[in-house]
Amino acid sequence: MKTLIRNRATTILAAGAIGLMALSGCSGTGSDSESGGGETQAEDSGGSSEAPEESEDGSMADSNLVGPGCAAYAEANPDGGGSVEGMAQDPVATAASNNPMLKTLTKAVSGELNPDVDLVDTLNGDEFTVIAPVDDAFADVPKDDLDALAKDSDMLTKVLTYHVIPGQMSPDEIAGEHETVEGSKVEITGEGEDMKFDDAGLVCGGVKTANATVYMVDSVMMPSK
């Protein structure tokens, strides 16, 4: 008898629990619908708040650029092979050939100034940090001196390879003395826009190519030996 009473009590309690659950479910349908809309809006809102992060990720290629001329360079070359994004797709000699600020340097390394000096395969074949004099830097060299340099293949090779450091270095690690491909050391001092490469000032640096990091400078550097 006691067992029967316990079984009936259990059945009644279970039924009551099921009823409460059913009522809870019914009353929650409207609130779920309302709160569900709120959750959807929150998710939508959350998606919108994440959009700037995606935009920041998209600009990561530009985050290491440093130098007083970077903004003007990017504005003048917003797309194409000479843009920051475009140069990142090609090895360094090819990327430099697409950069409108590096026409003279491109001629010098590709055999156009002197057919005995062609460094394209060398530059494209390994990882380098390239100190790249812009066209105005070459224009500042007296014409007679530049003509004499162009005719002397050994000296031209020395000057060009003095602007190349093995391995890639970012702006935050490039300061110091570094042995160049030419063999002597270049001294890089300062930081940010005040960075100096020997006595050459920085125009825009940290520009990535497929195999190199480029620092455009305002003077042609000369090796000490």
Image: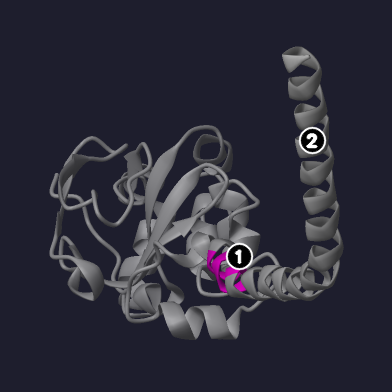
Q: For mark 1, what is the residue?
A: 54
Question: In the picture provided, is 67 more to the left or to the right than 100?
Answer: left
Q: For mark 2, what is the residue?
A: 14
Question: In the picture provided, is 159 more to the left or to the right than 15?
Answer: left
Give the position of the N terminus as an image quadrant: top right
The kind of residue tagged 1 is Glu
Magenta segment range? 50-56
Residue 70 location in percent, x, y?
Answer: 42, 77
The kind of residue tagged 2 is Ala
Q: Is residue 56 shown to the viewer in this render?
A: yes
Circles 2 and 1: CB distance less than 8 Å? no
Q: Is residue 116 shown to the viewer in this render?
A: no
Q: Residue at x 16, y 60 (%)?
A: 198
- State the image quarter where residue 78 is shown: bottom right
Q: Residue at x 36, y 58 (%)?
A: 149
Q: CA distance from mark 2 to mark 1?
A: 52 Å
Residue 171 location in percent, x, y?
Answer: 29, 57
Tell me the element at label 1.
Answer: helix
Q: Is residue 175 above or below residue 195?
A: above
Tell me the element at label 2.
Answer: helix
Give the position of the C terminus as an image quadrant: top left
Mark number, residue 119? none
